[in-house]
Amino acid sequence: MEYDVKVANRLKRIEGQLRAVRRMMDEGEDCKSIITQLSAVRSGVDRAIGVVVTENLVQCMQETLDEGEKNELVKQAMDLVIKSR
């Protein structure tokens, strides 16, 4: 599966946020600021997971003709999203 530019951009943004958190910790920033940035990282990861699951689900649904298989794919996708939280 190929992922589009949106996913790559999200991951780059998350990497930058993590670097910022490490820098903040090295510089002795206050806990509240660090937690705020870590929450932003978590939200970014959650959104990236949603994009990846959605793109994969759409592709799998287009390739699958059987309704039972489609239902199972949706269930598996939802399980992935729920487990990631």
Image (tube, rainbow, N blue to C red):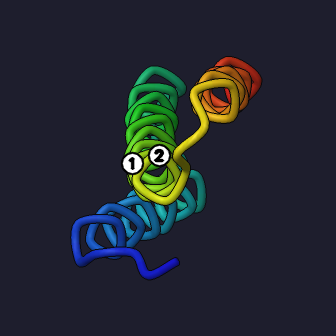
Q: Kindly give the residue lying farthest to the front in the view shown.
A: 66
**Mark closer to the observer (1, 2):** 2
42 relative to 65, above or below: above
Callout 1: few (<14), some (14-19), or many (20+) C-alpha neighbours within 10 Å? Answer: few
Identify the residue at horizontal 39%, vertical 48% (top origin): 58
Callout 2: few (<14), some (14-19), or many (20+) C-alpha neighbours within 10 Å? Answer: some
Q: Position of residue 21 (x, y in %)?
A: 49, 53
- Relative placement, left or right, of 62 versus 46 is left
Q: Quadrant of residue 40?
A: top left
On the image, numbered disc 2 is attached to which residue?
61
Q: Amino acid at mark 2?
A: Met
Please name whichever residue, 68 or 54, is drawn nearer the observer in this view of the structure: 68
66 relative to 82, above or below: below
Q: Secondary structure at mark 1?
A: helix
Identify the residue at horizontal 49%, vertical 59% (top origin): 63
Identify the residue at horizontal 57%, vertical 27% (top origin): 67
- Relative placement, left or right, of 45 versus 73 is left
On the image, numbered disc 1 is attached to which residue?
58
- Residue contact between numbered discs 1 and 2, judged by CB atoms under 8 Å: yes
Q: Amino acid at mark 1?
A: Val
- Relative placement, left or right, of 27 versus 8 is right
Q: Position of residue 28 (x, y in %)?
A: 54, 48
Q: In 3D space, how far apart are the residues under numbered discs 1 and 2 (Cα atoms)?
A: 5 Å
Q: Position of residue 5 (x, y in %)?
A: 23, 77
Please name whichever residue, 34 or 10, is drawn nearer the observer in this view of the structure: 10
